């Protein structure tokens, strides 16, 4: 068994995948306990597949190339998890990279945990928005939420700020925990990372946070899935993921820890807010009906959760009736966008 598996979903990633892989090899140190799975998700437009094979040939005991038919990001993560031999599992997108110094802080802990029968369930680090084209960066940390010097449980966490959420970038899960909860991400759909950092949380008991800038998240490339125009074009996929999350976890029945339940309610509120905002940006009769439908779906599937989500300040402000209400809600969204540096 390896200490950790890094799964790198790749789709026509030849231009930037090398930097991602090199960033992981930088802290390997030849100990043989790191596994890198390059999951080629049916790339056709460049030499991603050939590059993956070349990396395996160069590092046959560390890097493995998996070639599959195109199924989307979630499908690539599923295949990575199914083939992972590491005690821990970390997804690194092919256009992002890991910080060597930060990982040298985290790896000794992971190595020690991998020897234990009851290893820590979830390891968390900071992530950094790297807006390369703007020459700026924004660090997202959790020092105000989590203890920094020990393992802890959900009962010991503090309040998340409105801009703070656990993203795929910030988490390292124990591999068997993901398998035990039966995590399978939808195929041919963007935004599955929300499921990855939401559905497994009720099964997490022990947590360790390192206040180091572990993950570098490249943002701003044209056509990126979080690009505003792209999100409007893919709003049906955002709705699909939100419905999946509503169905996957009953926050009243499945989440026994009060502080975790509050966090997950806030996360689901954020997902509902995103649906509302972009549907109101589109501003057609069809999009308005879709907005009403997603709220009706939440009310029908989770009637006890619905009132708290609907009365969340995010959703009160972004669902005010009338054209004036629509403009007010979108104005608030764009103000938050500037303050919190997202998108």
Image (cartoon, helix red, strand yellow):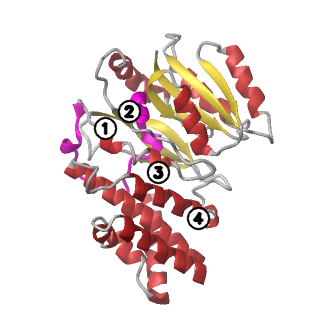
The magenta span reads 151-180
For the residues labelled 4 and 1, the Cα–Cα distance comes to 30 Å
Which comes sooner in the sequence, label 1 or label 3? Answer: 3
Vertical comparison of 64 with 185: above or below:
above
Whether residue 245 appears in this view of the structure is yes
Whether residue 162 appears in this view of the structure is no
- What number is the disc on residue 204? 1
Q: Are marks 2 and 1 in contact (CB under 8 Å)?
A: yes
Q: Are marks 4 and 1 in contact (CB under 8 Å)?
A: no
Q: Which residue lies under the disc numbered 2? A: 177
> Dot 3 surroundings within 10 Å: few (below 14), some, or many (20 or more)?
many
Tell me the element at label 1.
Answer: loop
Question: Residue, x 63% and y 61% (percent of image)?
Answer: 230
- What number is the disc on residue 236? 4
Residue 316 place in picture, x, y as percent: 35, 76
Q: Extreme front residue here? A: 300
Residue 244 place in picture, x, y as percent: 47, 56
For the residues labelled 3 and 4, the Cα–Cα distance comes to 15 Å
For the residues labelled 1 and 3, the Cα–Cα distance comes to 16 Å
Q: Are marks 2 and 4 in contact (CB under 8 Å)?
A: no
For the residues labelled 2 and 1, the Cα–Cα distance comes to 8 Å
Q: Which residue lies under the disc numbered 3? A: 194
């Amino acid at each position: 068994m390896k200490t950790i598996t890094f799964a790198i979903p790749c789709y026509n990633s030849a231009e930037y995948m090398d930097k991602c892989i090199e960033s992981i090899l930088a802290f390997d140190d030849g100990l043989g306990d790191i596994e890198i799975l390059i999951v080629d998700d049916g790339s056709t437009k460049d030499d991603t597949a050939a590059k993956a094979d070349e990396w395996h040939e160069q590092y046959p005991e560390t890097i493995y190339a998996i070639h599959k038919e195109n199924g989307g990001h979630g499908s690539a993560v599923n295949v990575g998890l199914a083939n992972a031999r590491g005690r821990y599992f970390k997804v690194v997108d092919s256009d992002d990279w890991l910080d060597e110094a930060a990982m040298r802080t985290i790896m000794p802990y992971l190595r020690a945990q991998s020897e234990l029968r009851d290893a820590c369930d979830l390891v968390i680090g900071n992530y950094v928005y790297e807006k390369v084209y703007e020459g700026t960066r924004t660090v997202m940390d959790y020092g105000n939420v989590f203890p920094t010097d020990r393992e802890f449980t959900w009962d010991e966490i503090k309040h998340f700020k409105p801009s703070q959420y656990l993203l795929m970038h910030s988490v390292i899960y124990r591999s068997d925990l993901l398998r035990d909860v039966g995590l399978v991400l939808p195929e041919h759909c963007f935004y599955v990372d929300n499921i990855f950092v939401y559905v497994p949380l009720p099964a997490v008991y022990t947590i360790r946070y390192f206040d180091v800038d572990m993950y570098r998240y490249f943002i701003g490339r044209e056509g990126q899935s979080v690009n505003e125009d792209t999100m409007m074009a893919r709003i049906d996929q955002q709705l699909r993921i939100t419905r999946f999350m509503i169905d996957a976890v009953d926050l009243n029945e499945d989440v026994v820890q009060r502080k975790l339940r509050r966090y997950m309610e806030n996360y689901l509120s954020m997902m509902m807010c995103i649906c509302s905002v972009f549907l109101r940006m589109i501003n057609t009769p069809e999009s308005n009906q879709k907005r009403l439908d997603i709220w009706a779906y939440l009310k029908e599937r989770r009637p006890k959760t619905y009132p708290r989500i609907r009365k969340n300040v995010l959703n009160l402000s972004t669902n005010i009736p009338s054209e004036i209400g629509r403009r007010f809600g979108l104005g608030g969204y764009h103000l938050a966008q500037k303050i919190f540096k997202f998108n």
